[in-house]
Amino acid sequence: MNLNHTLLSLKHVEISYPSSNGLGSVTAVKGLDLELQPGEIGCLLGSSGCGKSSVLRAICGFEPVQKGEILLRNSVVSSPITHIAPSQRRVGMVFQDFALFPHLSALENVAFGLQHFPSAQRASLAIEWLKRVGLADKAQAYPHELSGGQQQRVALARAMAPEPDLILLDEPFSSLDIEFRERLAGEMREILKKNRITALLVTHDQFEAFAIADQIGVMAGGKVIQWDTPYALYHQPINRYVADFIGRGVFVKGVVQASGKVNIELGELVLDPNHKNTVGEEIDVLLRADDIQHDDASPTQAEVVRKTFRGADFLYTLKLASGTEIVAFVPSHHDHAIGEKIGIHLVADHVVTFSQE
């Protein structure tokens, strides 16, 4: 990758904090590497405590780094011997709670970051950015008069108005109703792409990450386990942790066949041509909810042991004859009772396998 075209680069970054007992330190981020190209939207995805917010704070300049370096447009802004002030980094931030000033209108909130312009120009630029996020008609509204999604767009306009090189988003949808998050993530992606903004967000929600990001880094224990496209993370997870974290699925036991297939309880699946396992070897096969299809005509039966209504479909947990449990998405007009047996068959196209632990 040509560094001349890289907007953000983190090289072997380590971030530590003093331990709570005052003895030594706790390392939150360990040897982290990632790159973002101009106009790209990246995401750090992981559970609470994995170090993702620490990375965001270090890029902003709010946290020092103990090892490695952070570069913006090829210039080092953080290292053990360099620390450029946050105000000089040309980095915008959208906080978890949006951090809008409650006593200022939407227009005044957006104009707040434009103090270096004359007042008349500040107002015209603020209106322009409100137009870009579809809120020109809410210019005089105060934050409490706006919906959560509208507040989010005002916060985004305020961050974009000074035209920073990079915008960072810290769990930007966490305060919003869960049913709106994915749609709002899609809207935010459109706004960022339309304005050719480079952005990096952190979230614990993979559906938000998939809706907004070009590249996603799955984090655990202070490290990025895999930095890849959403498609590759889902279909080509680098290890068992990523496979288990991305998507809903379970591992079932399989035996490698001479035909380049793997035999599992539900039938045979075609292995990747690059598969290295030997014939007769027992392996674990990942079955996700979209790999199993409800089929009344199928002789293969499974018992409904749990179900979650999701509107358009149910997420069924099904028990096979062996006692193994799998999951399946079933259209919601198939409302089966707990304990009922239903017909199913395999529809898996991308087979993800791992050697048995």
Image (cartoon, rainbow, N blue to C red):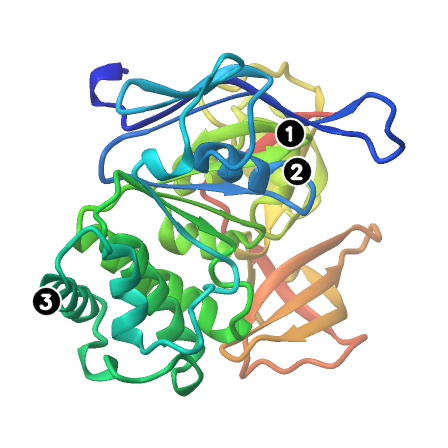
Q: Which residue is mark 1?
A: 222
Q: Secondary structure at mark 1?
A: loop
Q: Position of residue 181 (x, y in %)?
A: 46, 67
Dot 1: within a 10 Å radius of its alpha carbon, few (fewer than 14), some, or many (20 or more) residues? many
Verify CB contact (< 8 Å) between mark 2 and mark 1.
yes
Q: Which residue is mark 2?
A: 50
Which of the two labelled residues, at mark 3 and mark 1, occupies the earlier sequence position? 3
Which of the two labelled residues, at mark 2 and mark 3, occupies the earlier sequence position? 2
- Position of the N terminus, as image quadrant, is top left
In three-dimensional space, the C-alpha distance between marks 2 and 3, rounded to whole angstroms, equals 45 Å
User: Looking at the picture, which amino acid does disc 2 mark?
Assistant: Cys
Q: Which residue is mark 3?
A: 120
In three-dimensional space, the C-alpha distance between marks 2 and 1, rounded to whole angstroms, equals 5 Å
Residue at left offset 21%, top offset 70%: 130
Dot 3: within a 10 Å radius of its alpha carbon, few (fewer than 14), some, or many (20 or more) residues? few
In this view, 303 is above or below 52:
below
User: Looking at the picture, which amino acid does disc 3 mark?
Assistant: Ala
Residue at left offset 73%, top offset 62%: 318
